[in-house]
Image (tube, rainbow, N blue to C red):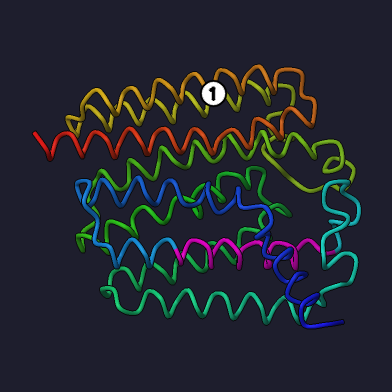
Amino acid sequence: MTFKNRMINYAKLMRLNKPIGILLLLWPMLWGLWFAAKGVPDLMILGIFIMGTVLMRSAGCVINDYADQKIDPYVERTKSRPLVIGTVTAKEALLLAAGLSFCAFLLILPLNYLTIMLSVIALFLAASYPFTKRFFAMPQAYLGVAFSFGIPMAFAAQTEELPMIAWLLMLATIFWVIAYDTAYAMVDKADDLKIGIKTSAITFGRFDVAGVMFCHIIFLSIMIWIGVMQQLGVAFYIGLAVALQLIIYQYRLIYHREPASCFKAFLNNNRVGTVIFIGIAIDFLTTSGA
């Protein structure tokens, strides 16, 4: 195998050709950093966290495929992944995951002690999540903790503190992740039932659509609560209103539980994250300029 082909296979294993996971991990971190910095984040911290998000999401994908290499051949969506078809070996995957994690840790070293300690927890969450679907009825909740952990890290890096707003924002994000990853799990629900792994889509049963929407409602409710507590302005609530419209659109997509439409609903959450961030950024920009 040529060096170029090997790099292409590594990139596929890291899902660099499918950046949706990076984006969904990025938005909550940016929300947290903008709140922590009152709309004016330290540029070095911003750069470190963006690069760290890409590295840790990539490492998480590699670990996930290593953990699922005996499951993925039986799932239609995953049966052609590099570890399944043999273009990347298990040893290569472990070395790649370790290298990506080490690079992410090096990025964090210029930051304060609290951020470094939180990064160790973040690494543990990312490494352990793929194994939770074997025994945990709601692995999407564990993923929610992992995907929202950039929020307290952002506060720690920017302010060296972990105020209540950080934990509320993290809680909101956990429910958002459960919502969109349940829609994602609905894509593979038939295959997952045959294999015997656990997902929230299976745990919710015939209430899977209701479960997705209930989590979205809690997510938006907490975000409104945060807006009230932080005395945010119109721009923030416009962002939430647009997000609500996108979520209503997602409901129409998942209502009939068709895999392609459920996957489309999952992808649509990038827009939810985007409009909420735009609302936060504009609100702080207009407030600071007042």
Tag count in the figure? 1
Is the residue 178 above or below the residue 25 in the image?
above
Identify the residue at horizontal 36%, vertical 30% (top origin).
222
Residue under the point 37% across and 27% down: 239
The amino acid type of the residue labelled 1 equals Ile
Task: Locate residue 197, reporting x and y percent.
Answer: 78, 48
Residue 205 coordinates in the image, percent (x, y): 73, 27
**Which residue corresponds to the image point at 39% horizontal and 45% vertical from the top-left?**
170
From the image, which quarter does the N terminus lie in? Answer: bottom right
**Helix, strand or loop at mark 1:** helix
The answer to whether residue 249 is left or right of residue 104 is right
Side (left or right) of 144 relative to 132: left
Looking at the image, residue 95 sits to the left or right of residue 125; the answer is: right
Which residue occupies the extreme left position in the image?
290
Where are the magenta residues, as a range?
51-69
Q: Which residue is mark 1?
A: 247
Q: Is residue 158 magenta?
A: no
Look at the image and say whether residue 52 sits in the magenta stretch.
yes
| Res. 192 image quadrant | top right
Counting from the top left corner in percent of width and height, residue 129 is at 61, 58
| In this view, 249 is above or below 90 | above
Which quarter of the picture shows residue 236?
A: top left
Nearer the observer, 225 or 53: 53
Vertical order, 243 against 77 (above or below): above
Quadrant the C terminus occupies: top left
Residue 285: x, y in percent? 20, 39
Crowding at label 1, few (<14), some or many (≥20) Cα neighbours within 10 Å? many
Q: Is residue 118 above or below residue 150?
A: below
